[in-house]
Amino acid sequence: MIVAENLTRVYTMGRVEVRALGGVSLEVAKGEFVGIMGASGSGKSTLLHILGLLDRPTSGAVTIDGTDVLALSDRRRTLFRLNRLGYVFQDYALIGELTALENVYLTSLVRGASKAEYLERSAEILRRVGLGDRMDHRQSELSGGEQQRVAIARALVNNPSILLADEPCANLDSQTSRSILDLFARLNEDLGQTIVMVSHEDWHKEYFCRIITLRDGLIDEMVECRREPHPG
Amino acid sequence: MIAVLEGLRVSAFLAWKAIQRGSRGTLALTIMIIALIFVNLVFLPSIISGVVVTFDAQSIDFDLGNLVIEPREGSQYIDDVTGLQKKVEQIPGITGTSPRITAGVTYFYRGRNAASTLYGINPEDERSVTRIAEYMTAGEFLSNGDTDAIVMGVTLAGREGEEGGGLPSLEGVGVGDSVEVAYPNGETRTYRVKGLFETQSFGVDTAAFVTAREMEGVLGLRDQASIILVKTEENGREEEYKMEILSYGVQEEVRTFREKSGGFVDQAIQSFNIINAISTLVSLIIAIVVVFIVIFINTVNRRRQIGILKAIGIDQQIIINSYVLQVLFITAVGALVGIGLNAGVTTYLTAYPLVFPGGPVYPDVEASAILRSIASLFGVSVVAGYIPAWQIAREDILTAIRG
């Protein structure tokens, strides 16, 4: 469960201060599929970065599964990201020198899994996202949709309690986008995966349980469950 | 400890993939530069060591033997040479002694003249100490009974029409020719050249030898010598033998061949070591700069990748270590290639040695020099690789990802 309280984020650019978040409070329950929407510059990516421990707020508090994550040292935040969070980037963020399979099992390697264990688990997840026959291909040999599936598989391989996705379909055509969103929906429905996804596409709303709309760094609207959340 | 090992496993994985799938050209070039730096680090010390080995060998084999016995202070000659020889030769490990009478003379040949040293020797004794007799290029070495014969170094004998270039030269003396010698006491003698020798040690090749009996006659000496050369069973233990000789009650001056050389070698080594230190410093600076640039460019190009790795939960130290391991790999392969190149250079210079005034110099590659070069290369490479990797890896995640 995520609890964010009164988050602000102010960037200083020279003498100018830009307020990306002006005091955002929200809760995400276990098993929810939450969409964060809003126009460009509304602060949705900034919010996701803070929830994903990639950035620190200027003020406010974030608790994930009971841990005050802002109080953690950089090293413990890294470990937290490794063990508890999965992050899917807009532009896939794969390691170009690694194959799909290697990209997926890299974090399992850090966690000290045995070779048999991480190979089996990574291959299984890649099969689940429909890439059973593309495991040995490198990033340059995969389509955009396939790369995003690899990124999703990588985010899932360590069984994160929360999956965060930053506009994962931004660079994909609508057909591929739908297949990616179907995959997220299946993960949420079948496995009870908690998902927080940033999107600006209106038609994505049908996939979310709850939609939080940001405007100018503040919550403008919070629409409760269009779909029933997974029992968790 | 287990976490550290797990971390190293991931660092090794990332490093190997970067090496395996990164730019082959850059990798090969960097390895080659490291290899050449290694050769430079090893080559100069091997030549310096070779010079020392050559000088020592030349001194022992042709000029001084392992030790020399000289007259007591205030005396020009050693007296009772036969008795002293017997005393010294009974010491275990002493394999020979050769008394020499030394005189600065002027040689005359067909209107040309040259000033140099003439030694009076007992040919059989000389054979037991020096190897000059094995290096005859023409004619024969002296025999004990020779009184009108002289053997001469090829430099002193010279070549027809060629001046000595600063060295004493009679410009074309051959075996069978007659040479007139003017002694310092005003006596002159004419000798038939019995043989010519070439040791490649310029101090020896500019000298000549007659028998001690002949020289004693000219200078009016009896059982006396200017110096006695002493040959020991093994080289490198001269100090021990010196103490041993002194313990036998020898009152004359006893010195090792190095001491006799008057610190010439030590001074030369010191000068060489300064040159070597400068060369080593320059080589290591080049190594630091090359490795730093390679890793800096590598990390800057992979800045985004480093950000991604941190974002997905990979510890900064694992990322830094992956670059350090790449550097270690490059340095290890570079050093191996360097050892190969060095072996090639050494083989070539052994077949075609550098010629120094003291004789041909063969590279003497010492294991300690190789180990020292490898250690210093690894040391500077790790530092030069660590700094840029650390600089980029400590960057804020989002800044790194945005490139």
Image (cartoon, helix red, strand yellow):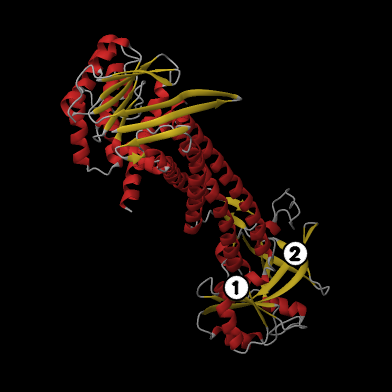
Rendering coords of residue A112 (x, y %): 27, 44
Q: Above or below — where is B268 with respect to A60?
A: below
Q: Amino acid at mark 2?
A: Ser
Q: Is residue B155 visible?
A: yes
Name the residue: 35% across, 46% down.
B8
Disc on the earlier residue, 2 or 1 = 2
Q: Nearer the viewer, residue B371 or B223?
A: B371
Q: Is residue A154 left or right of residue B210?
A: left
Chain ID, mark 2: B
Q: Is residue B283 left or right of residue B326?
A: right
Label 2 to label 1: alpha-carbon separation: 22 Å
Q: Quadrant of the N terminus of chain B?
A: bottom left
Per the image, the residue denoted by label 2 is B116
Bin the neighbour count of mark 2 within 10 Å (Cα to Cα): few under 14, some 14-19, many 20 and up: some
Q: Tell me which corner region of the image, top left, top right, bottom left or bottom right, holds residue B183.
A: bottom right
Badge number at residue B143: 1
Seen from the viewer's position, the closer of residues B82 and B161 is B82
Picture quadrant of residue A81? top left
Whether residues under marks 2 and 1 lie with C-beta atoms below 8 angstroms apart, the answer is no
Left or right: residue B29 versus residue A104 is right
Residue B178, percent from left and from top: 72, 63
- Element at label 1: loop
Q: Quarter-wise, where is residue B272 in the image?
A: bottom right
Chain letter for mark 1: B
Q: Amino acid at mark 1?
A: Ser
Which of the labelled discs sits on residue A135, or is there none?
Answer: none
Residue B82 placement (x, y as % from top left): 63, 86
Residue at position x 21%, y 27% from top?
Answer: A126
